[in-house]
Image (spheres, rainbow, N blue to C red):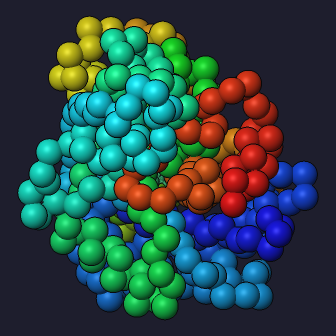
Amino acid sequence: MAKDIFYTALDIGTSKVCTVVAQVGPEGELKVVGVGLVPSQGVEKGRIVDIAEAQEAIQSSINEAQRYLGNRIPSIFVSVSGAHVTCFNSSGMIHPDSEEKPVTRENIERLVQSSYPDIPVDKQILHVIPVNYVVDGYRGVRNPVGLHAGRVQVESHVVLGERDILSKTTHAVENCNIPVGGMVLSPLASSEATLYQDEKEMGVVLADIGAGITDLAIFKDGSLWYNASIPVGGNQLTRDLSVALGMPYYFAEDLKEKWGHASPDGSESGEEVLLPSFQGQPRRLIRRTLLCKPLIERLQETLGLLQVKIQQTGMTRFPPGGVVLTGGTTKIPGLAELATKVLGCSVRVASPMGIRGLSHEQNKPAFSTVIGLLLWSIKNHSQKGLYSSKGDWNSGEPKTFFQRIRSAVQVR
Ligand SMILES: Nc1ncnc2c1ncn2[C@@H]1O[C@H](COP(=O)(O)OP(=O)(O)OP(=O)(O)O)[C@@H](O)[C@H]1O
Ligand SMILES: [Mg+2]
């Protein structure tokens, strides 16, 4: 029964390692039953640089989440991000056996598998996502299964990761005696928890600004169309502040979280902050606007880099859905205002949606990836093979979130 199925997700970030175990309730609601949150170690910008350290953090996070559960976690979905992840769009075509017979699921699986070229040996496919089907010249077909057609084409979005880096991640997790159930691109996971289907249909840019990386995903016509990452995040803001104030990193981190503001007019002018004492120096007061200056400059630069990445795709303006920001760094007040000014489009900051049982501490943008991973694992639970189609969730009548979960679980 659905209520006995546990879904587990692991987000290995630059600042934190987080495991969340959830269960689908009788009403189809997704409820968190265990959380393991520990500081990250041995990880830099999406890459495991010290497998023993990373494994220790992963093990502690899993143990903590398992403690609430009482059972062993059967398998786990893991997030993947970083500069080693690349993507391209590709297309393929088939002529089904006969126009007399409807197109089958097997036909479509074969089509999708054939829609991308051979992959270099050092790369591994993470996702092949059918973006659009063209049936006998008609574009925009959501699901050709059951149609009578002489020719079916597909445009796919292919996401690749570096084999070595992915296998290090797999080893670090599987050495904790839990098999990896799947690996999911981080911003694709975050999108599951933060974006409305309407935004994906209209076209939207999602940016997850974490501690070491800003992950980017662009959606068009309901599907992932582009993804990239920028090696800048909140750690850089803290480093800048630490240099500007001549203070150690951990003081700067605390000051950033307590007093940081991203909008030049947002903090009351004249407001002052008492800095902690360091190296026996007396404590001193500085204007809050002065403290925020390096943070704002770095955020402006990061948003500028984001804009360049988007322009490099050939897009000349932002999609109608605008920009959705998530990730721990978006906790800084005033970021939506700053981003609206820099990017010149509508911007909203998103926390994870569609789950119960998260504490106030966890119901924050830093948890969008891990919660999205859970939602992704439920959605793709019944699907085999490499690709995840838009399938069940997008077809037919629009459904509420809980209805979608229920139907995804009932597929089993
Ligand atoms: N109130 C706040 N103001 C500004 N920054 C904040 C605030 N709270 C948290 N942060 C920053 O959020 C970052 C952590 O975000 P998050 O947990 O999303 O990163 P991560 O997933 O561990 O890293 P990554 O995704 O980059 O590998 C840290 O840099 C932290 O300083
Ligand atoms: Mg992250």
Give me the residue at 24% from left, 52% from top. Answer: 160
Give me the residue at 36% from left, 16% from top. Answer: 136
Q: Considering only vertical position in the picture, is 102 above or below 231?
A: above
Residue 326: x and y in percent read 52, 39
The answer to which of 329 and 168 lies nearer the viewer is: 168
Residue 249: x and y in percent read 36, 61
Residue 363: x and y in percent read 70, 50
Give me the residue at 66% from left, 78% from top. Answer: 65
Give me the residue at 50% from left, 32% from top. Answer: 102
The answer to which of 50 and 278 lies nearer the viewer is: 50
- Which residue reaches farthest right? 26
| Residue 231 visible in the snapshot | no
The answer to which of 166 and 229 lies nearer the viewer is: 166
Q: Is residue 26 left or right of residue 35?
A: right
| Residue 118 visible in the snapshot | yes
Q: Considering only vertical position in the picture, is 330 above or below 308?
A: below
Q: Is residue 339 left or right of residue 123?
A: right
Image quadrant assignment for residue 386? bottom left
What is the number of callouts on the image?
Answer: 0
Q: Is residue 44 left or right of residue 252?
A: left
Quadrant placement of the C terminus: bottom right
Quadrant placement of the N terminus: bottom right
Residue 314: x and y in percent read 20, 16
The quadrant of the picture showing ligand 2 is bottom left
